[in-house]
Amino acid sequence: MSAVLTSEAANVSKAQAPSSIVAVLLGTGVVGGAFLKLLNTPAASSIRLVGAANSRRQQTQAEQLADRSLREKLKINGDARNDASLLAALDANEASVKVIIDATACGTLASRHAEWLERGYHVVTANKSLAGGDLPGWRALQAALASGGRYGDSATVGAGLPVISTLRRLRHCGDALLTLEGVFSGSLSYLFNQYDGSQPFSALLRRARELGYTEPDPRSDLSGEDVARKLLILARCAGFALRPDEVEVESLVPDNLRGVDVAAFLSRLEELDEPLAARFAEAKARGGALRFLARLNQRGRARVGLVEVPANHPATRLYGTDNQFALSTTRYNTQPLVIQGPGAGPEVTAQALLGDVLALA
Ligand SMILES: NC(=O)c1ccc[n+]([C@@H]2O[C@H](COP(=O)([O-])OP(=O)(O)OC[C@H]3O[C@@H](n4cnc5c(N)ncnc54)[C@H](OP(=O)(O)O)[C@@H]3O)[C@@H](O)[C@H]2O)c1
């Protein structure tokens, strides 16, 4: 017998071997696809995938799940979506750890996380809709966690940079957050790291979109809503149970471009240029720079928006799509604890999911 198994053969053999963790994957897009690749690596050998789904189809057959083209095949083939049969696939297994991995941005799925935890499943998620959503949903999640299920949320902020874990650890040690400030969006980081007035903002935005740094509809990034959700998640981790309407959000999308369809928005990007050029020129004249910052102060006041910062501000020393989180606490009070690094990307986000899944065992 050959000493080297092909990846597919290794998968089939893994499907037959006892695993300590059984998992269902919801979402086989950019992040879910990268997670499926990680499942084929030795690091994931204790995980057995028993179900996978996109928005329209799902698969629970072991041989199909072990197929390296699973993601592509699910686009055209598979059973109709039905959460109950995915949960049944988890229940049919003897493994002690049963986890639902949510790699979607679907609010409806996120609204079921608490129920799944109460039913004895663990949940690992890149989906921010529950932890960064309405306060009642977040409170239901906290209540459900009392039933013993665990919630892996490292991928929801900073694509797995160790910010949520650090905040929890500091709090556990009796430290308290005084202020939090940073750049929480890879796309907005790129845009303002690059914007130096030499080219219109719209040209830079088109380039960022081509590079895959923005969502297909860049208004999702420019609205600041995604950053606001991340700030809510972190504020709540730090003990500030804020409502979404308590985060002041400055959108960079002009009012008259909010209701138009994506194609119309993309054809009118130049309308962003003049107001941003004026703000840039004002900041430059004072020796400052523009950065899209999220901020939380000691009284729980939260704001997300474009800020003029001095030239020596830590956020001016970012590269590419870096995120940055500067935490001042009662013990880190002379200099903030700064966590910085790539805050987007499928591989690192999928790795954050994998780390949370492995931590369940
Ligand atoms: N991309 C990144 O770098 C990054 C970084 C950090 C966090 N995240 C977060 O990770 C999540 C996924 O991002 P992505 O970039 O992978 O998005 P994506 O490429 O758009 O993929 C989303 C996937 O979710 C599936 N889906 C939607 N509703 C579903 C449902 N009800 N049941 C099962 N599957 C469903 C979609 O199915 P269809 O294929 O049928 O549409 C698609 O496969 C988002 O919450 C995002 O904010 C992404």
Image: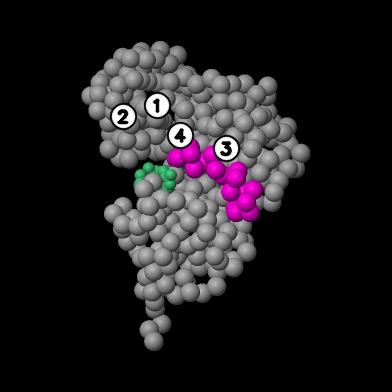
Query: In front here: 175 or 304?
Result: 304
First along the sequence among labels 2 and 4 = 4
Which quadrant holds residue 193?
top left
The alpha-carbon separation of the residues under discs 2 and 4 comes to 14 Å
Q: What residue is drawn where x is 45% and y is 40%? A: 106
Of badges 3 and 1, the one in the foreground is 3
Image coordinates for residue 20, horizontal then vertical, percent: 58, 67
First along the sequence among labels 2 and 1 = 2
Proximity of marks 4 and 3: CB atoms separated by less than 8 Å: no
Of badges 2 and 3, the one in the foreground is 3
Relative to residue 229, is residue 360 drawn left or right?
right
Q: What residue is drawn where x is 25% and y is 21%? A: 268
Image coordinates for residue 96, horizontal then vertical, percent: 62, 64
Q: Mark 4 — residue? A: 185
Of badges 4 and 3, the one in the foreground is 3
Q: Amino acid at mark 1?
A: Leu
Q: Mark 1 — residue? A: 222
Say whether residue 341 is magenta: no
Can see residue 213? yes
Q: Residues within 10 Å of mark 4 (few under 14, many from 20)?
A: many
Q: Mark 2 — residue? A: 205
Q: Which residues make up the magenta segment?
A: 105-122
Seen in the picture, residue 289 relative to 11 is either above or below; the reply is above
Q: Amino acid at mark 4?
A: Ser
Residue lying at the far left in this picture: please name it.
267
**Element class at badge 2:** helix
Which mark is drawn over residue 131? 3
| Quadrant location of the C terminus in the rendered image | bottom right
